[in-house]
Amino acid sequence: MPDEPVSLPRRLGRRAFLGRGAILTAGATALGTVFRRAASAEPGSDLPPNVPPWMTQQGAPIVSPAYGEPSPFEHDVVRRPRAKTPTMTASSSTTPLQDLHGIITPNGLHFERHHAGVPAVDPDTHRLLVHGLVDRPLTFTMNDLMRFPSVSRLHFLECSGNGLWTGGTTKSTVQQTHGLLSCCEWTGVLLSTVLGEAGLKPNATWVLAEAADAAGMSRSIPIDKALDDALLVYSQNGERLRPEQGYPLRLLLPGYEGNMSVKWLRRLKLGDQPFQTREETSKYTDLMPDGTARQFTFVMEAKSVITFPSGGHELRDHGFYEISGLAWSGRGRVTRVEVSTDGGASWADARLQEPILTKCLTRFRLPWRWDGSPARLQSRAIDETGYVQPHRPELVAVRGVNSFYHCNAIQEWQVSADGAISNAV
Amino acid sequence: MRSRGLAAAILAVLCAVPRQAFAQDGPTYGLGQPAAPSDIAGWDIDVRADGQGLPPGSGSVRDGLKVYAERCAVCHGDKGEGNPMDRLVGGAGTLASANPVRTVGSYWPYATTLFDYIRRAMPFNAPQSLTAEQTYAVCAYLLYLNQIVPADAVMDAETLPKVQMPNRNGFTSPDPRPDVHDRPAP
């Protein structure tokens, strides 16, 4: 592409995008071709005016394979280890947010965080024990649990370690900076329904949730949350849970830090105080600059990130692009997302794509015309409580840089004149 | 017509369920089986800060040194210095510094959590393989390495909950967030 004169980035404002529906529609098609331009530039027999070979012979038969897989051309759309860890069983992998569309995370791409690997739990012998401060200690089979009235709800799940207090490196992708984030339709039974079967003693104020993995991973859940919107989940996105997501049974606490949504759930014990497990004392506590640590910081605060364009992407042509990203809040619905292309000097309202659900990812979009000059892309989410996603310096001023968890700072991607996108650090 | 048919269908379903299932003070659905005390005992492995859940048995610092050397040191270092896995010893006075060192000694608020965690999750290559005596002993040794208990200490269901951890009062709750307030949206 020949060089074009470089001009200042177009300032984004409401007015700039009024009446641009036609451009938006055309652009949606153009966007799909952005990364194919290189291929079409090379001579090849598959390109027009030739007829490609897949039109001149039968394709693959049905059920090959019986459980469908993505196109082999999508082989780079995979989870990746988040960091080097001493073992691969106490570790985490990230969702390739830069390659996903809409709000649903495909089951095979849901992020992982395991403390002792993925156990191979037999659903026929798996049991859920509910005991402690209850009237009737009960044991449930999976068959029992699936007979209860069920609910299906869309919720995000985010590790409280998602987000980098230090900001990462210039080469960081959104998978590396924000990939401990996924969103599924979860199907199961309300935890309150199952607890009702056991009957709660009046002094039951906390629930210990314990996993059937080799860490016996355990967290204390406040009873108010347990009786509010907590779910015992056996399906995600229409099929039974993936082993990495807790097959055959997991807890799901909408809006709370992912670690509390205990996978491979085997035991719920009602108590009158938190159980002070390792994962709520030594870990998942937030160290402040004064040396004290916040304990039981459960909610994932409002956050957003631009997933296109983002670190590692490349804009090969000047012209129309749709800036797109994800916003979410553990306190409820996202009500507004603002996008800046000039590093926060000016902001424009992004369009929020339906559905806009509580404690769920919301996809936002903003049309943008890149004129070839450097740009600084930011997004910030505002939720139904009025909370505004903060800039990193504001977070650091209060919490320092050693609290490790719950970093929900505004993310910036830098667009250079050659179209390369990098993480702003 | 249609709604009346639906109501009749719902009524029929309700009548088919035993009345007992709808008793206010009993279970609604009648699903699940009563849990036998013996079954509960096998799974009820948690230990609270007040010591509830600690099993019979005891372990000394001296016994713990041996168990630790055989089962723990390969991951946590001969003296709990860590590498490749978590550092367990030291770090006193560093929590408010630029480079805080979070260990059992400097950070953990409850000694009982040590027993709970070791029993359920350690050693990494063979969780739930230590006896209660071995687990008490490892707790004693780690507390000794952190200079929290003396060399002749013995840990059991009575003594472990009474250990005063240095950072016992270092944790705050409830959650003070939202604690950062960006400028309001225009």
Image (cartoon, grey):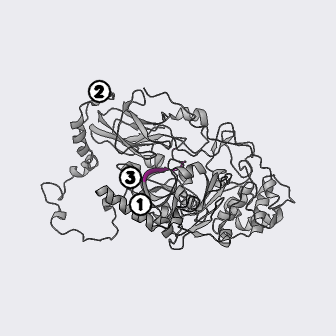
Residue A108 is marked as 1
> Are discs 2 and 1 both within one chain?
yes
Q: Position of residue A13 (x, y in %)?
A: 33, 28
Q: Total of numbered circles in the picture?
A: 3
Asked where in the image residue A126 lies, by quadrant, the reply is bottom right
Residue assigned mark 3: A104
Asked where in the image residue B77 lies, by quadrant, the reply is bottom right
Mark toward the start of the polypeptide (2 vs 1): 2
SS at circle 1: helix
Residue A159 is one of the magenta-drawn residues: yes
Q: CA distance from mark 3 to mark 1?
A: 12 Å
Q: Which residues are magenta?
A: A153-163
Q: What amino acid type should be assigned to the residue bearing mark 1?
A: Gly
Residue A15 is marked as 2
Can you tell which of label 3 and label 1 is closer to the viewer?
A: 3
Q: CA distance from mark 2 to mark 3?
A: 31 Å
| Residues at circles 3 and 1 in contact by the CB criterion of under 8 Å | no
Tag 1, which chain?
A
Report the front residue among B102 and A312: B102
Q: Classify A415 as above or below A188.
A: above
Residue A266 is one of the magenta-drawn residues: no
SS at circle 3: loop
Q: Position of residue A292 (x, y in %)?
A: 69, 40
Q: Classify A394 as above or below A206.
A: above
- Of all residues, the one furthest to the right in this rendering is B152
